[in-house]
Image (tube, rainbow, N blue to C red):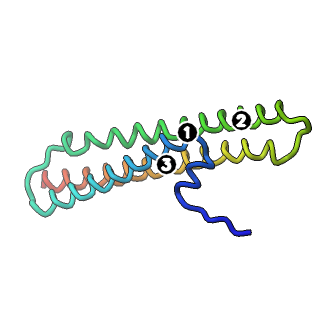
Amino acid sequence: MKTTTNLISIMQQGGAVMWPLYALLVITVVLSIERTITLILLVRKQEPVIKAKVEKPLSILDLIAMIAPVLGFLGTVTGMITAFRSVSQASSVQLQVVAAGLYEALFTTAFGLIISIVATIASFALDFAIEALCENEKS
């Protein structure tokens, strides 16, 4: 039996914590694209760049890199709570009852870690580009 996997189904399978994680992913992608476009435009204009002003939004990426895994672990805890609640309410313990909660837990943990990795790489790459741009201004 083939199941279709789309973003909405993934969000539903991961539980309520997936929605704030998805918001963090959207912010990460939008901010990364915005900063990249801004840096490209600054290079083309060849105007002096104020480093602090250009790199200030990168602190949001750093914050997301720290918050995303914590939210993922929160999803792990809520998934485990769901699993144990299902076990306590079941007349007989079946693997499927426990697996549903563990599935939710693993989804959120993985998603939180992926977002953190993306945000960290984006922040590092953009910071590196800003450093290079500001070094060119000094020359």
Looking at the image, do the residues carrying marks 3 and 2 touch, with CB atoms under 8 Å apart? no
Identified by mark 3, the residue type is Ile
Q: Nearer the viewer, residue 90 or 116?
A: 90
Q: CA distance from mark 2 to mark 1?
A: 13 Å
Q: Residue at x 31, y 43 (%)?
A: 58
Looking at the image, do the residues carrying marks 2 and 1 touch, with CB atoms under 8 Å apart? no
Q: Position of residue 125 (x, y in %)?
A: 36, 54
Q: Position of residue 9 (x, y in %)?
A: 58, 55
Identified by mark 1, the residue type is Val
Q: Quadrant of the C terminus?
A: bottom left
* 19 lies left or right of 63: right
Q: Quadrant of the N terminus?
A: bottom right
Q: How many marks?
A: 3
Residue to which mark 3 is pinned: 115
Identified by mark 2, the residue type is Thr
Q: Residue at x 35, y 39 (%)?
A: 60
Residue to which mark 2 is pinned: 82
